[in-house]
Image (cartoon, rainbow, N blue to C red):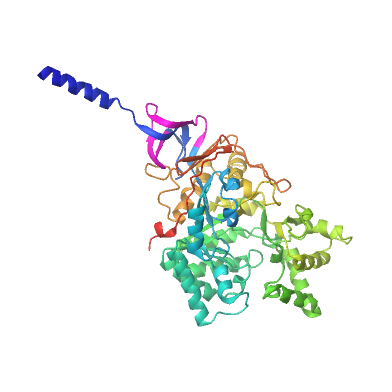
Amino acid sequence: MRITSIALLLVLCITGCSKKEHYDLIIEHGWVLDGTGAPAIQADLGIRDGRIAKVGDLANAEATQRIDAGGLTVSPGFIDLHAHIEPIMRLPDAESHVRQGVTTALGGPDGGGPWPFGKYLDSLSQNFQLGMNVAYLTGHNTIRRRVMGNANRKPTTAELDTMKAMVRKAMNEGAFGMSTGLKYLPGTFSETSEVIALSQVAGSMGGIYTSHLREEGLGLLAGVREAILIGQEAKIPIVLTHHKAMGKPMWGASKITTGIVDSARAAGLDIMMDQYPYTASHTGLSVLIPSWALEGSVEDFKKRVSNKGERTRIMEGIKFNLLNDRGGGDLKNIQFSNVRWDSTLQGKTLHDYVVMQGKEPSIENGATATIEMQLKGGAGCIFHAMSEEDVVRIMQHPFTMHASDGGLAKFGEDHPHPRAYGTFPRILGYYVREKKVLTLEEAIRKMTSLPASRLNLTDRGIIKEGNIADITIFDAERVSDKSTFVEPHQYPVGIEYVIVGGVVTVEKNSMTAKRGGKVLKGTDYLKR
């Protein structure tokens, strides 16, 4: 009897000990970059219930699905800290972003967050299957417009209190902080004290402040100093978003701005930057027009350009911007991306438009054409007015994060900036592999753990056991952007797999039918 019992125990032990670990997904044979900047190691990842359950040798483990990542790089999913994801309800798959390797995007930049904030997030969460995770900032321009319209004045005490309450409400409903677009209407009409007051609310609730500076051309240095002052006075972490030096007179100014950032950090301020890897920006044609001329309604603008004296002032302002700011001194530098009233102009330039009218492509005629186009409904424009040396210098700063500033693109629709398709592959292919501006380890850190830390996403941005399984797998020897300013609608190559919350969303460089994206809320992450 004793021998039989011992034998039975041995059989049970052998049976139990031989039971293999089981995972939903195993990624095997890949070179793992954990996102911290550390060198790659060869390891397998075991994913269970949407999280990384094991990092190590899983050759003997079982899995429902296996991905052979032999010869590929396995990294945390890329986090886009500046994304124009306004079309997310129309394009919930977010294919143009996900196929770049992006697993999380922060929306609501440049002062343009949604409102009502909580209702928007709830609708997005409940009614759509998302291709990637999304988080949001609340927008100063959105809030100011709701309270004050397009007025060029200081808020009353009651109006400021209302705006502060709106920021507080958005933070309580899941915002990760507040964004400003001080170059745009109506934020451009606000004084620094107003922005400080609103930022104090977001900062007291653990949020961040991202700033489209008041000026990125001749007023760049003052714009940077204003953002730092806001951060200092409001006691809030700062991001100088899509940081750049715009217009030939300011080329090289990144030497000064990055120095200002270093000095501010040395003084104890929490300041970072984000940047897209291109020498062209993308915004509305109206950026060429003096802000004061756009106060109020479209009818107000029509009246101003019909008044001889005011039209002269407006023309002088536009000509100045064409020569010294986003115009870059040449009408060919202004390329149309979205012209609702004449789609045949998309992809063409302001130079082309003036010539098509039978006129000399002079700065004077360019200014006249800008007014005419604005009266017809305006246009989205790509402005080729930045220096590659500034792009590289800003990119190399240790506290610069890679971000697209790109909108969600529908394949074949309009003429978007190529960053909508190519930002992250361009960093990995052109700036890492070809130009060696950054090491691969550092580039991955700047698109994973660094932005995750900015948002306090403690369960993302680093490959480690227990973290959410947001993973991008790419071929470091082949990854490349294909989208160009001439032919933007081209997906990148070399992004082989994208896994969002454990769900394989991109497989062998193509979208699957599976979706794992979530709406992330600051209330779940921010320290209050």
Position of 126 relative to 119 (above/below): above
Residue 333 in sight from this viewpoint = yes
Position of 338 relative to 490 (above/below): below
Residue drawn at x 45%, y 56% is 455
Q: In the visual, does 108 lie left or right of 287?
A: left
Residue drawn at x 44%, y 57% is 521
Residue 384 in sight from this viewpoint = no
Write down the quadrant of residue 306 in the picture: bottom right
Number of numbered tags placed on the structure image: 0
- Camera-side residue of 15 and 210: 15
Q: In the visual, does 56 lie left or right of 285?
A: left
Outermost front residue: 127
Q: Residue 168 in the image: x percent, y percent?
A: 45, 69
Position of 393 relative to 55 (above/below): below
Which quadrant: the C terminus?
bottom left
Magenta span of residues: 44-73
Task: Say if the magenta span includes residue 56.
Answer: yes
Q: Residue 493 in the image: x percent, y percent?
A: 62, 38
Task: Say if the magenta span includes residue 498.
Answer: no
Outermost right residue: 358
Q: Magenta region, mostly helix, strand or loop?
A: strand
Q: Residue 347 in the image: x percent, y percent?
A: 75, 52
Q: Residue 175 in the image: x percent, y percent?
A: 47, 62
Write down the quadrant of residue 16 in the picture: top left
- Camera-side residue of 21 and 208: 21
Which quadrant: the N terminus?
top left
Q: In the visual, does 176 lie left or right of 146?
A: left
Write down the quadrant of residue 154 in the picture: bottom right
